[in-house]
Amino acid sequence: MKRTGEKVLSIIAHVLNVLAVGLLIVMLFGSRMFMDMTMSDPVLQSEFESQMSASGLTQAEMDDLLLYMDDFIGFISGVGWVFVVLGLIALVLGIIGTIRVDKNAKLAGILFSISAVLSGIISLQGILLIIAAIMCFVRKPKSDISLQKTDENGYVID
């Protein structure tokens, strides 16, 4: 049975997944570079400190705030890399499912479902993979067996 619909939906989902993971990687590197660049620029750092001191913060509070900002960016970066790894695992599982969809539709549906959960069910690629998984589970191959009883001459028997 041809499974063109499942293949098309999964390929579109894979392209979106690659774009999302690529954009996330660029954002993670960009945020780290931005933080490193801003913390090493003495003019920007002195302007930042003057704005904080104008708001009435003490030197200890400013140091704590800077340390907190650096820790927060590190935490967000760590969580971002977890999402990158999950996205790559989802991509690999989805590609395997796309390859296997003609041979074993149930396995492909399971792989599409796992890939949708890993890439995010509410994301567009997750929705497309869920639709492809449902199509894999629901669509059955056409049977060649006739449901009507016929006699030796081909007439339908009631």
Image: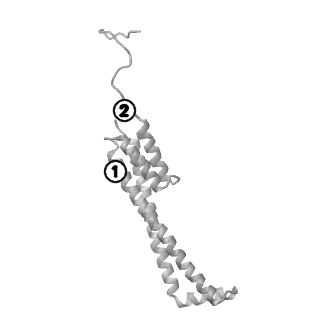
* Labels 1 & 2 near each other (Cβ < 8 A): no
Q: CA distance from mark 1 to mark 2?
A: 21 Å
Give the mark nearer the N terminus: 1 vs 2: 1
Seen in the picture, residue 92 relative to 80 is either above or below; the reply is above
User: How busy is the neighbourhood of tag 1: few (under 14 within 10 Å), some, or many (20 plus)?
Assistant: some
- Image location of residue 6, percent across then percent down: 40, 43
Judge from the rendering whether residue 145 lies leftward or rightward of residue 69; answer left or right: left
Residue at x 48% of width, y 52% of height: 126
Seen in the picture, residue 149 relative to 14 is either above or below; the reply is above
Q: Quadrant of the N terminus?
A: top left
Secondary structure beneath dot 2 equals loop
Secondary structure beneath dot 1 equals helix
Q: Name the residue that disc number 1 marks.
A: 96
User: How busy is the neighbourhood of tag 2: few (under 14 within 10 Å), some, or many (20 plus)?
Assistant: few
Residue at x 34% of width, y 12% of height: 150
Seen in the picture, residue 66 relative to 138 is either above or below; the reply is below
- Image location of residue 49, percent across then percent down: 61, 88
Q: Name the residue that disc number 2 marks.
A: 141
The residue type indicated by label 1 comes to Ile
Q: Quadrant of the C terminus?
A: top left
Q: State which quadrant residue 106 falls in.
A: top left
How many numbered circles does the render carry? Answer: 2
Q: Which mark is residue 114?
A: none
- Image location of residue 26, percent across then percent down: 45, 70
